[in-house]
């Protein structure tokens, strides 16, 4: 089983990477329990891929290191995504990575369990989880775990953060274990779901169903 952590931290070390590591430390063994071997964990540091991410938009294709990161994300059984908060939202680097991923493989996150997390200097930015991160990954068709984790500067070392980390990581592990035990298509992707919004009924047909005559043809 594979667990991938995507960290958008900019410094070394960073609180963003630290939060990702702590979440993975709980989720990896929980995902494979009662087996003794934890899930394989890979950390993708976006700061190391920043130039390649930018070039993807101008060149039209990812360079080798970025393509490898995309493949790791697509092949993962679960993701932990962590971003610092800038201007009350995720960082531009974080968003650009997932924009480039969706251009390269629009179904890379379809049906994939994702744990969202963020770090910031003050607790008042905690709503970023629900007004920015959760809608983004819902749009990318991921399965976002119910509990997100936000860590402000004053949270480090506090019991509340440990409890949130444990709860969110176990929720991710449960989703990973459940999906790995279900039957999947040969391409290791969930079966496509029928989307009624993609089926457009012609306007004239709707009028006919209501007994209303359609518009007269142009002379």
Image (cartoon, rainbow, N blue to C red):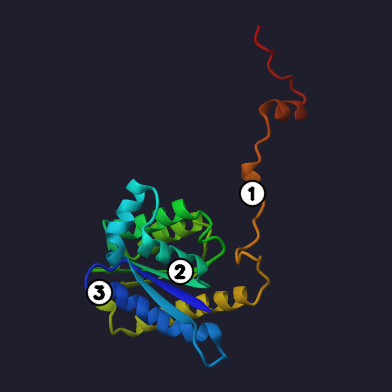
Which part of the image, by quadrant, shows the C terminus?
top right
How many neighbours does mark 2 have within 10 angstroms: few (below 14), some (14-19), or many (20 or more)? some
Q: CA distance from mark 2 to mark 3?
A: 22 Å
Residue 76 lies left or right of residue 197; in this view the side is: left
| Residue drawn at x 46%, y 70% as measured from the top left | 79
- Confirm whether residue 178 shows in the render: yes
Q: Are marks 2 and 3 in contact (CB under 8 Å)?
A: no
- Name which of mark 3 and mark 1 comes first in the sequence: 3
- Name which of mark 2 and mark 3 comes first in the sequence: 3
Q: CA distance from mark 3 to mark 1?
A: 41 Å
How many neighbours does mark 1 have within 10 angstroms: few (below 14), some (14-19), or many (20 or more)? few
| Residue drawn at x 33%, y 77% as measured from the top left | 19
Q: Which residue is mark 1?
A: 195
In this rendering, is residue 72 above or below 23?
Answer: above
**Closer-to-camera residue (115/38):** 38
Q: Which mark is residue 22?
A: none
Q: Circle 1 sits in a helix, a strand or a loop, which is it? A: loop
Q: Which residue is mark 3?
A: 14
- Across and down, in percent, residue 5 comes to 40, 73
- Confirm whether residue 89 shows in the render: no
- Across and down, in percent, residue 192 comes to 64, 56
Q: Which mark is residue 72?
A: 2
- Across and down, in percent, residue 142 comes to 52, 62
How many neighbours does mark 3 have within 10 angstroms: few (below 14), some (14-19), or many (20 or more)? some
Q: Circle 2 sits in a helix, a strand or a loop, which is it? A: helix
In this rendering, is residue 63 above or below 146?
Answer: above
Q: CA distance from mark 2 to mark 1?
A: 28 Å
């Amino acid at each position: 089983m594979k667990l991938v952590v995507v960290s958008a931290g900019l410094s070394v070390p960073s609180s963003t990477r630290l939060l990702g590591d702590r979440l993975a430390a709980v989720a990896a063994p929980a995902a494979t329990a009662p087996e003794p071997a934890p899930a394989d964990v890979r950390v993708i540091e976006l700061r190391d891929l920043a130039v390649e991410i930018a070039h993807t938009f101008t060149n039209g294709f990812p360079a080798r290191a970025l393509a490898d990161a995309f493949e790791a994300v697509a092949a993962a059984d679960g993701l932990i995504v962590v971003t610092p908060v800038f201007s009350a939202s995720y960082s531009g680097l974080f968003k650009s990575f997932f924009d480039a991923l969706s251009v390269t493989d629009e179904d890379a996150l379809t049906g994939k369990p994702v744990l969202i997390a963020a770090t910031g200097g003050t607790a008042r930015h905690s709503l970023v989880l629900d007004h920015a991160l959760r809608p983004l990954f819902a749009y990318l068709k991921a399965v976002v775990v119910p509990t997100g984790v936000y860590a402000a500067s004053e949270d480090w070392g506090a019991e509340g953060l440990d409890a949130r980390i444990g709860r969110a990581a176990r929720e991710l592990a449960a989703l990973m274990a459940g999906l790995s035990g279900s039957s999947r298509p040969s391409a290791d992707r969930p079966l496509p779901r029928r989307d009624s919004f993609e089926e457009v009924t012609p306007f004239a047909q709707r009028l006919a169903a209501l007994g209303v005559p359609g518009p007269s043809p142009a002379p």
